[in-house]
């Protein structure tokens, strides 16, 4: 993120940015003597959009969803973007998770009985 502030006299539009900001509001404009100021603040942001989907199949007679599917791009625990597929099937007792980096490196590949599954500490 970049942030640029410009301070100018509101009456004559003289650029007062080079005067220290603490002094700019207490010092009269050297051109017209006014104490009125206009502050222009420009902010530029960089935003990265990730796509992901989390689907839950529910059964009114059960507390937890019977199936969950999560796939797409997510921020991993290390702060980096990863591609993830996770399927939790409580009907057929399956846990499937596949995670890879954007460069194609496989980070995690698990397909096991859900009753034996223990959550991972890695992202």
Image (cartoon, rainbow, N blue to C red):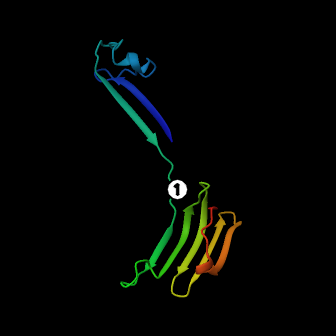
At horizontal 56% and vertical 84% (from top left) the residue drawn is 93
Taking 77 as reference, is 39 above or below it? above
At horizontal 50% and vertical 52% (from top left) the residue drawn is 47
Residue sitting farthest toward the front: 115
Residue 99 position, x and y percent, is 64, 69
Residue 117 position, x and y percent, is 61, 75
**Left or right of residue 46, residue 37 in this image:** left
At horizontal 31% and vertical 20% (from top left) the residue drawn is 12
Return the residue nearer the eye: 121 or 101: 121
Return the residue nearer the eye: 85 or 10: 85
Residue sitting farthest toward the bottom: 92
Residue sitting farthest toward the right: 105
Residue 58 position, x and y percent, is 41, 81
Which corner quadrant holds the C terminus?
bottom right
Taking 118 as reference, is 80 above or below it? above
Q: Quadrant of residue 103?
A: bottom right
Return the residue nearer the eye: 97 or 80: 97
Q: Which residue is mark 1?
A: 48
Q: Quadrant of residue 71?
A: bottom right
**Left or right of residue 121, residue 59 in this image:** left
């Amino acid at each position: 993120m970049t942030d640029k502030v410009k301070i100018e006299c509101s009456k004559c539009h003289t650029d007062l940015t080079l005067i220290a900001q603490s002094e700019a509001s207490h010092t009269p404009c050297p051109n017209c003597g006014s104490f009125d100021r206009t502050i222009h603040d420009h902010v530029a942001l960089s935003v990265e959009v990730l796509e992901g989907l989390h689907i839950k199949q529910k059964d009114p007679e059960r507390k937890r969803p019977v199936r969950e599917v999560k796939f797409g791009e997510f921020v991993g625990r290390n702060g980096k973007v990863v591609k993830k597929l996770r399927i939790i099937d409580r009907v057929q007792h399956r846990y499937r998770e596949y995670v890879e980096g954007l460069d194609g490196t496989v980070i995690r590949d698990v397909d096991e009985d859900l009753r034996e599954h223990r959550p991972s500490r890695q992202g």
